[in-house]
Amino acid sequence: MKIIKPILLILILFASGIIYAHKDRIEVPERFVFILKRGDVIRFESLDSKVEEFSKEIVRKKIEISEVHLYYKTGEIVTVQSDGVNWTLFKITFKGKSLYVPQEKLKKIKEINFSTLNLFWSGESNAFNSHYLCLRFDIGTQSSFGVFPNLELHFENRKFSRSEVWTQTSENSRHGKTF
C-alpha cells in the first residue's frame, strides 16, 4: 500500500503536465502605440480605459491612423499600417522574424478594432515556436445580438493558412465562414 500512493502521485503529476502542455495560450496586448496620419503618437497601456473608445473612433473613421504597434508580454509585436484608405501591412514579429498577412486578405479588411486584437497559439512559450497561431479581432460597425463579427487570421508552420469571419447568429451560437 505504501508504494501505491507515490506511484499514483507520479501518474497524476505526469497527466497534469501533459494536459497543461497542450493548453492554448491567449495573450492580449500590454501596450498600444498609435501613429496618427498627422504624425502624433498616442500610447496606451492595456488597462487604460481609453484604449477601447480610441479603437472605436478608428473603426468609425473619426481618427485616421498611419500605423499601429501592439506589444505582447511574450515578446511578439503586431504592426498594422494604413495609407488612409486601405490596410497596407499586417505583420507579427518576434526576435527579428516576421509573419505577414497576404495583400489579397488585407484588401478585404475594412475595419480593425485594435482593442480586441488577441493572439492564440498552442502551449509553447511564444507564438513563433508554436505549430499554429491565430490573430483574432473584432471587425465591422454592425453588431448582431450585441456582438461584433470577429476575424481570425491563422498561421500554421510559420505560414499564413486561412482566414475566417465569425458572426453571432443567435444569443448562444455563432457561424463561421471563409473570409
Image (cartoon, rainbow, N blue to C red):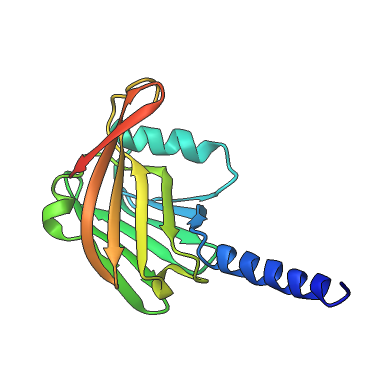
- Does residue 156 appear in this view? yes
Quick check: can you spot residue 37? no
Seen from the viewer's position, the closer of residues 170 and 129 is 170
Decide if residue 166 is on the left or right side of residue 130. left
- Give coordinates of residue 97: x percent, y percent: 34, 77
Q: Position of residue 56 (x, y in %)?
A: 39, 33
Question: Residue at coordinates 41% horizontally, 25% vertically from top-left?
Answer: 172
State the residue in front, 93 or 7.
7
Instruction: Name the residue rendered at 42%, 56% in the picture.
Output: 119
Residue at 47%, 53% in the rendered image = 32
Relative side of 8 to 165, left or right? right
Q: Is residue 56 above or below residue 36?
A: above
Of residue 1 and residue 86, the one placed in the foreground of this image is 1
Q: How many marks?
A: 0
Q: Is residue 121 left or right of residue 166?
A: right
Indicate the quadrant containing the C terminus: top left, top right, bottom left or bottom right.
top left
Q: Quadrant of residue 131 in the image? A: bottom left
Counting from the top left corner in percent of width and height, residue 50 is at 53, 37
**Residue 126: percent from left, percent from top:** 48, 70
Q: Residue furthest front?
A: 1
Could you tell me which quadrant the N terminus lies in?
bottom right
